[in-house]
Image: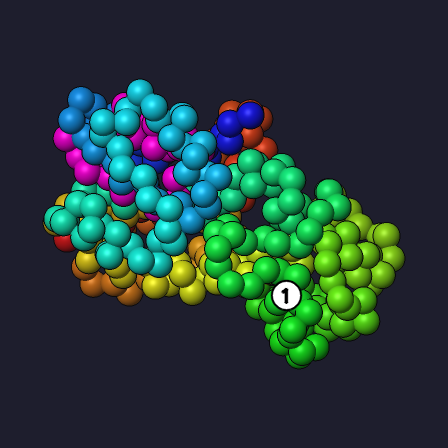
């Protein structure tokens, strides 16, 4: 099953795409956005696709096979964006896109530890060659450090209680070890959103240094853009959206294309409920 790209029409229309444009997709994933971009920039447009996840790169190669002459794929974190562009293109680019959502493929792939719906090793790394798994992070952190991570990255109101349960249950090895610790605090009471959602978000963000990587990549994206080029970011929670909003507002080399973030239409939400929290912000280099 292929991941469904969110805000696809809004991305294609908002990026001012045209034949011959050079586009950098920093979060290639299942290449849903990339494929639409390649169609919109045909016949001569080029795409540089970046993803830290080797499985994502392999799947993208399959999905973009017919466009292979116009695509370069790099398995690396976009924290090295300028270096990657310099190595594979050597000039300024027209568009830089970030889709900060994680794909259903990562959720469903056994053994990655992204989902609390399965019982599997607690890994959570996008790049399996990076140093520390989520389990190692939990097992080596102090109670205060765990509390801070849960509050900062998960906005979890009961962070200290959950941290205490995690410490008591160590060594943490699996996703269900974490779920049991959370449910010991919430005692089975919850509404539509599972109580472990915020905790899993917090440890995923911390394991992959997601916010730090984003903050480091945004100025690199601006530096890589040619005048009139556009940078677009799709966010899925308030932490990353705040970083993008503040950066776009304060960066003197940018002007906002959309004053308020674009959201999914009612029709898209009917077809893809996962798009409900997605926000698209676009800015143009002056």
**Looking at the image, which is closer to me, 132 or 45?**
132
Based on the displayed image, in which of its 4 quarters is residue 49 positioned?
Answer: top left
**Residue located 48% across and 52% down the image:** 127
On the picture, is 70 further left or further right than 197? left
**Residue located 17% across and 34% down the image:** 21
Residue 18 falls inside the magenta stretch: yes
**Looking at the image, which is closer to me, 222 or 31?**
31
On the picture, is 59 further left or further right than 121? left
**Looking at the image, which is closer to me, 95 or 43?**
43
Residue labelled with disc 1: 136
Q: Classify 161 as above or below 13.
A: below
Residue 183 falls inside the magenta stretch: no
Dividing the image into 4 quarters, which one contains the N terminus?
A: top right
Give how far across and how far down residue 97 sits, in percent: 32, 44
**Looking at the image, which is closer to me, 98 or 114?**
114
**Residue located 29% across and 54% down the image:** 81
Q: Classify 118 as above or below 122.
A: above
- Answer few, some or many: residues within 10 Å of disc 1's Cα (few below 14, many 20 plus, some between 14 and 19): some
Residue 255 visible: no
Give how far across and how far down residue 193 sits, in percent: 71, 47
Residues in magenta? 15-39
**Residue located 70% across and 77% down the image:** 143
On the picture, is 133 further left or further right than 172? left
Residue 95 visible: yes
Give how far across and how far down residue 33 sits, in percent: 37, 33
- Please give the count of numbered marks on the rendered protein: 1
């Amino acid at each position: 099953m292929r991941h469904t790209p969110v805000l696809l029409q809004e991305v294609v229309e908002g990026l001012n795409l045209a034949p011959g444009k050079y586009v950098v997709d920093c979060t290639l994933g299942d290449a849903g956005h990339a494929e639409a971009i390649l169609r919109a920039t045909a016949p001569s447009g080029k795409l540089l696709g970046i993803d830290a996840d080797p499985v994502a790169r392999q799947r993208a190669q399959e999905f973009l096979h017919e466009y292979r002459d116009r695509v370069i794929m790099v398995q690396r974190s976009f924290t090295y964006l300028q270096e990657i562009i310099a190595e594979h293109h050597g000039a300024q680019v027209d568009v830089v896109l970030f889709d900060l959502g994680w794909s259903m493929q990562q959720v469903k792939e056994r053994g990655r530890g992204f989902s609390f719906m399965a019982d599997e090793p607690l890994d959570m790394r996008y790049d399996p060659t990076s140093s520390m798994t989520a389990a190692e992070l939990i097992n080596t952190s102090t109670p205060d450090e765990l509390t801070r991570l849960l509050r900062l990255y998960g906005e979890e109101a009961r962070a200290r209680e959950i941290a205490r349960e995690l410490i008591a249950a160590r060594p943490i090895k699996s996703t269900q070890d974490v779920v049991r610790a959370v449910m010991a605090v919430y005692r089975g009471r919850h509404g539509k959103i599972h109580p472990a959602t915020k905790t899993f978000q917090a440890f995923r963000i911390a394991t992959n240094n997601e916010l730090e990587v984003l903050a480091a990549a945004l100025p690199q994206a601006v530096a890589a853009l040619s005048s009139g080029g556009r940078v677009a970011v799709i966010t899925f929670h308030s932490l990353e959206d705040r970083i993008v909003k503040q950066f776009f507002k304060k960066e003197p080399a940018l002007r906002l294309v959309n004053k308020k973030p674009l959201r999914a239409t009612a029709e898209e939400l009917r077809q893809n409920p996962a798009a409900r929290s997605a926000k698209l912000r676009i800015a143009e280099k002056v």
